[in-house]
Amino acid sequence: MTPEELDAQIELTDRKIVSLTRYWQHALPSVELPSRAQFLLWLRMFDYAFDAVYYGIGETATKCERLGGMSLDHAVRFCSKCAITFRKARALPQPPSDKYVKPESVAA
């Protein structure tokens, strides 16, 4: 890796953190903002996949609305759980939708 590539990767990570921070503030205004280290931890956990963390924040916002509020600790844990679930679901092989096989009738 060249120094230019490293600088570009650092800049991209910083932009992702800023975007996720703004999205958190927009989606969860009643919950205080996690630290920058928490956002960096999430990105590292999911191989810098922005969409996994974005999905987790969105699901956390939905649950926060249902509950009428959340603590920071609860929001961070729930967001992590949702992002992990999202990442696992994407890793599972998906059966092709065009190859539906009708189950055999049991009453034969």
Image (spheres, helix red, strand yellow):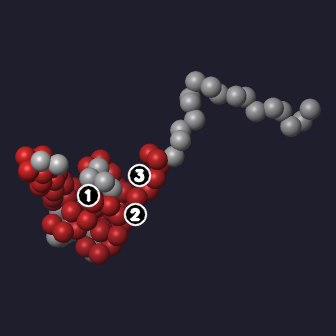
Closer mark to the observer between disc 1 and disc 3: 1
Closer mark to the observer between disc 2 and disc 1: 1
Q: Residue at x 12, y 48 (%)?
A: 2
Q: Is residue 14 left or right of residue 86?
A: left
Q: Earlier in the sequence, mark 2 or mark 3?
A: 2
Residue 86: which numbered mark, if any? 3
What kind of residue is marked 1?
Answer: Leu
- The reply to whether residue 2 is in sight is yes
Disc 2 and disc 3: Cα gap in Å? 9 Å
Q: Is residue 4 left or right of residue 98?
A: left
Give the secondary structure at mark 3.
helix
Q: Residue furthest top?
A: 98
Q: Is residue 4 left or right of residue 49?
A: left
Residue 43: which numbered mark, if any? 1
Q: Residue furthest right?
A: 108
Q: Is residue 26 left or right of residue 57?
A: left
Residue 71: which numbered mark, if any? none
Asked if the residue at tag 3 contacts the one at tag 2, i.e. Cβ–Cβ closer than 8 Å, the answer is: no
Q: Is residue 22 above or below residue 100?
A: below
Asked if the residue at tag 3 contacts the one at tag 1, i.e. Cβ–Cβ closer than 8 Å, the answer is: no
Q: Earlier in the sequence, mark 2 or mark 1?
A: 1
Q: Which residue is mark 2?
A: 81
Q: Residue at x 46, y 53 (%)?
A: 88
